[in-house]
Amino acid sequence: EERLDEFRSILRILHKAYPNLWFVHNTRSLLKWIPGRIHNCWPHIVNIKENWAGWVRVWNSCCHASFGVGGNLSCWSRAEGSKLNLPRRIEAAGFAYPACCEGWGFYQEAWHQVHRTVDEEIGA
């Protein structure tokens, strides 16, 4: 929330100085922006930037809320877990779910917060 308040303050200052500054703000659609932000644990199955729908299917098969806490455990098992593209020093057994599954929700919320703030402060 502190970073959003800082962003809001900077936005107000810029808008006051440059009222026509709307074009500078990130107005890309969520579906064009988000694939470049999320860590892809499954590049051996799908390229997130080239096949968003395919990536969502893989994500749902491992991360959907219907699997409960920790997601689909078979996705993090020895055989499947060894294929995951995880950030260095992260082991599939303990941290694959947060690394592979939680980013999508985080970046969706961040995108929506920034766009709501831009709309509130300078209007569309």
Image (spheres, grey):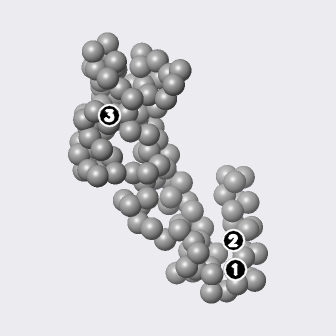
Height in image: 33 above or below 90? below
Q: Secondary structure at mark 2?
A: helix
Comparing labels 3 and 2, the label whose residue is closer to the camera: 3
Q: How many marks?
A: 3
At label 1, the amino acid type is: His
> Which residue lies under the disc numbered 1?
15
Looking at the picture, does residue 61 appear above or below residue 51? above
Proximity of marks 3 and 2: CB atoms separated by less than 8 Å? no
Query: What element does badge 1 sit on?
Result: helix
3D distance between C-alphas at marks 1 and 2: 6 Å
**C-alpha span from label 3 to label 2:** 37 Å
Residue sitting at x 34%, y 19%: 81
Of mark 1 and mark 3, the one earlier in the sequence is 1
Does the residue at mark 1 contact the one at mark 2 (Cβ under 8 Å)?
yes
The residue positioned 27% from the left and 15% from the top of the image is: 79
Residue 108 appears in the picture as rendered:
yes
Badge 2 crowding class, 10 Å Cα cut-off, few under 14, some 14 to 19, many 20 or more, is some
68 on left or right of 116: left
Q: Amino acid at mark 2?
A: Leu
Q: Which mark is residue 42?
A: 3
Mark 3 nearby-residue class (10 Å; few <14, some 14–19, many ≥20): some
Classify 10 Å Cα crowding around label 1: few (below 14), some (14-19), many (20 and above): some
Task: Identify the residue at horizontal 59%, vertical 75% (top origin).
Answer: 24
Q: Which residue is mark 2?
A: 11
